[in-house]
Image (cartoon, grey):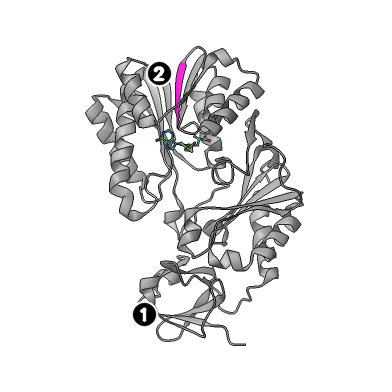
Amino acid sequence: MKVPALILKPGREKSLKRRHPWVFSGAVERAEGAPAPGATIVVRASDGQPLGLAAYSPHSQIRARMWSFAAGERIDADWFRQRIAAAVARRAGLDPAAGVRLVHAEADGLPGLIVDRYADLAVVQLLSAGCEHWREAIVAALVEATGVAQVYERSDTDSRELEGLEPRSGPLHGPPPAAPVEIVENGLKLAVDVAHGHKTGFYLDQRNNRARARAAARPGITALNCFCYTGAFSVALAAGGAARVVSIDSSAPALDLARANWAANGLDAAHAEWRCADVFEELRRARDRGEKYDIIVLDPPKFAPTPASVERATRAYKDINLLGLKLLAPGGRLITFSCSGGVSADLFGKIVAGAAADAGVEAIIEARLVAAADHPVLLSFPEGEYLKGLVLRRI
Ligand code: SAH
């Protein structure tokens, strides 16, 4: 049977020749052979030259995602077995008991697929029509490569809608998780609620940055953790010696798990304060009350999910960073992040510099932070570099 094809407009093959893995709708001249959603198609330049094999997403602006730049390859269950085994092998040095991202989409040659492993449980996100098409092969390959007892699906994201897919979540292999699963990150116990938590249940990308926050803490200091989710930074700051950690999040269930995580690490409840509040409002109240902190962590959700929202996101980042800098004690540190793909490290630096200028605060950049190495960035796909952070020291 002839493989359906996607023919590009003249000149639109350039990015694929540089191995960028996406084909945007505007680059497409026509589809041939009536491909179904998620079907494998051969992508061709306008002169017919084959550029590689891709998954077809007829409903998305990203019309095709490249599986391979070798047009002669065969995309089948065995191909997924090899790609997933390779991704798992690249993480061989990482301890599953600490939580590991096993598959990081484009950077592992598997656009649309995210897999996080927490001990003996893997959580899968199938975010593209192509991954949906191959779901059984993907789950089988994952079980084979890892030997995990349970696989749970959390494909309940907005991005599925752009692909014309229904949200889906639930067990795919083995029994459903009866309770939050425990991981031990940098020696600290953290419960992960894979069924009800955000994304796959936990933010593994911040692993090294939490260790960094812990190392920056000193005995007796006071710390503030904004957008604390389940308190992973809070616990790390306490492990570093913080005598008091104030944590803010708008999600009550996240704070319940955060309290449990605090207790599970033998920390005294009297040294923690959990504020269920909007960070934008709570930071203003903290400023009006004259609160001061030695370390402040700002790890907000993605303020700019689309290119169109970058301007609004810029204002939001500036606002919280300005307030955060004002709450810093002299010599204190602001550890501030953006996980918006649309906000580059350069732009983020400018936003924070603008916030410091408006706050009348001088600071030095002690470090620039990125996601942990199990969230790799493909050289040919800089859009994948979503997480960026700064450690600033007030002088
Ligand atoms: N730092 C966390 C991850 C943060 S995820 C970690 O290391 O695990 C972002 C968090 O921000 C979520 O828990 C979400 O509930 C919270 N959030 C989003 N908007 C908020 C707002 N305006 N005010 C307070 N919390 C908010």
- The amino acid type found where label 2 is placed reads Tyr
Q: Residue at x 61, y 18 (%)?
A: 267
Label 1: state its secondary structure.
Answer: loop
Which comes before the other along the chain, label 2 or label 1? 1
Q: Which residue is drawn at 54% across and 66% down?
A: 129
Label 2: state its secondary structure.
Answer: strand
Q: Foreground residue, 64 or 145?
A: 64
Question: Is residue 395 visible in the rendered structure shown here?
Answer: no
- In terms of image quadrants, where is residue 144? bottom right
Beta carbon of the mark 1 residue lies under 8 A of ligand 1: no
Q: Is residue 43 left or right of residue 140?
A: left
Mark 2 crowdedness (10 Å alpha carbons): few <14, some 14-19, many ≥20: many
Tell me the magenta residue range.
222-226
Image mark count:
2
User: How far across and down, in percent of the image, does residue 112 sit?
Assistant: 54, 60
Magenta-highlighted stretch: main secondary structure?
A: strand
Beta carbon of the mark 2 residue lies under 8 A of ligand 1: no
User: Can you say whether 130 is above or below 371 in the image?
Assistant: below
Quarter in which the N terminus is drawn = bottom right
Question: Is residue 16 visible in the rendered structure shown here?
Answer: yes
- The amino acid type found where label 1 is placed reads Lys
Assess whether mark 1 and mark 2 are in contact (beta carbons under 8 angstroms). Answer: no
- Which numbered marker is on residue 58? none
Real-space Cα separation, disc 2 to disc 1, in angstroms: 56 Å
User: Can you say whether 335 is above or below 246 in the image?
Assistant: below
Quarter in which the C terminus is drawn = top left
- In terms of image quadrants, where is residue 387? top left
Mark 1 crowdedness (10 Å alpha carbons): few <14, some 14-19, many ≥20: some
Taking the magenta stretch, the answer to whether it contains residue 246 is no
Q: Is residue 98 left or right of residue 304?
A: right
Residue receiving disc 1: 9
Residue receiving disc 2: 293
